Image (spheres, rainbow, N blue to C red):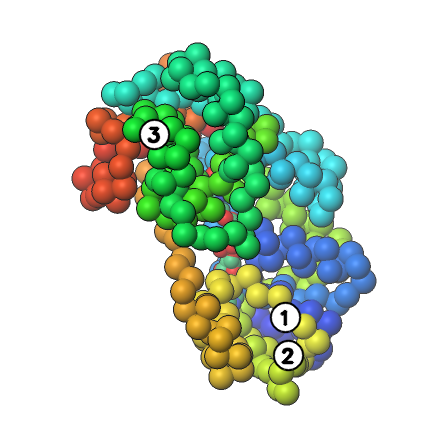
Amino acid sequence: MARDWLKGAHSFYDVVVIGSGLAGMTSANLLARLGHSVLLAEHHYNLGGMATWFKRRGGHILDISLHGFPCGMIKTLRKYWTREMADSVIQLKGIHFDNPQFSVNTTFDKVDFSRILMDHFGIMKDVIDDFFKTARSMNFYDDLVMTTGELFEKFFPGRKDVWRFLMEPITYANGSTLDDPALTYGIVFSNFMDRGVFTFQGGTDQLIKKMKKELLKNGVDIRNHCLVEKIHVQDKTVNGVRINGKDIACNAVLSNSNLLTTVHKLVGDDKFDPRFVEEVNKVRLNNSSCQVYMGIRKGEKIDYAGDLLFSSDADEYNTEKILSKNVTSRTFSFY
Ligand SMILES: Cc1cc2nc3c(=O)[nH]c(=O)nc-3n(C[C@H](O)[C@H](O)[C@H](O)COP(=O)(O)OP(=O)(O)OC[C@H]3O[C@@H](n4cnc5c(N)ncnc54)[C@H](O)[C@@H]3O)c2cc1C
């Protein structure tokens, strides 16, 4: 008989959190700390969602994601998790660009980027300041008509080398290109430009292990192998979920399943205002990158090439080349 992964679960929780990605775990932890009874349902056998890793013989633990993130993670970990976790976040100081147009090293923060834009690319300080100010002020309520390419053309007309310097890391981070709304660029760029690129010392496996310990300490009922199949809604109010064929009642659901699945499949279009569904249909989910992992034998070493290396053989950055199956740009993360 198949194992009952919900054995011992209650029939009611204040909140059911769907998915144990970083967002799901963080909200489950906060809700539990606020005194709510929380069920965290994850259909994978592990916690962490995309923040995951795999092990190989020879002692390699290879992180799938979280190679670099903005410094905001320190505050997030301190506020929603523990000081110990926040203290394990460290800055990556060696970011290197190498392509036919330029070869530069940077700490990837606003001060250093401004210096390079002035000294290496010859851009006036006023223009740089104005560009940073514009990128920083972008928010989700803005007009989404302007593309990133148009934004660059406005501030750095014809300067394809500058565009590449500004764009390559963001393409790596969120898969966006010059043809996407400038907002997709502005928010991510400003986040990193705050203070640079950071990572979790010890690796993602350690981070997730610490998070799990904290969730259990705060009383969250964590259930792996549990697929939420349906969110029950009656009279415009959530009243439960179906997990692995079993109904569990709740007062609220926080879904970390993706937006389209949550609306179309878990809840159902008929439960929403048609105008809302129309807006949801416009959402495109981004898939950013393909990764290859390489481990080296114990005792062997490779020469220092930085913490992050943005390398490319392409003569210039453009959307077709980035999306082409003929790969010309590669980012290396060393750890
Ligand atoms: C290859 C790669 C590299 C990346 N590199 C970086 C990086 O260097 N820096 C950085 O900041 N970010 C990086 N990211 C992005 C980062 O990993 C994600 O943004 C983040 O982990 C997403 O967390 P999340 O909680 O929003 O969603 P997810 O991690 O997608 O979590 C969703 C969870 O919900 C579960 N789920 C979904 N539906 C159901 C259901 N119906 N029932 C039960 N469970 C369900 C899934 O199994 C999953 O565990 C990378 C991502 C990838 C894929």
- Expressed as whole percent of the image width and height from the top left, the position of residue 222 reads 64, 62
Amino acid at circle 1:
Val
Callout 1: SS: strand
Q: Are marks 2 and 1 in contact (CB under 8 Å)?
A: yes
The image quadrant of residue 313 is top left
Callout 2: SS: strand
Cα gap from disc 3 to disc 2, whole angstroms: 51 Å
Residue at position x 42%, y 62% in the image? 283
Reply above or below: 310 against 189: above
For disc 3, the neighbor class at 10 Å (few under 14, some 14 to 19, many from 20) is few
Q: Which residue is mark 2?
A: 238
Q: Is residue 11 left or right of residue 166?
A: right
Q: N-terminal of the two: label 1 or label 3?
A: 3
Amino acid at circle 3:
Pro
Reply above or below: 280 against 317: below
- Expressed as whole percent of the image width and height from the top left, the position of residue 170 reads 42, 37
Residue at position x 69%, y 49% in the image? 213
Reply above or below: 260 against 50: below
Q: Which mark is residue 253?
A: 1
Q: Is residue 2 visible?
A: no
* Foreground disc of the pair 3, 2: 3
Which of these two is toward me, 312 or 3? 312
Q: Which residue is mark 3?
A: 157
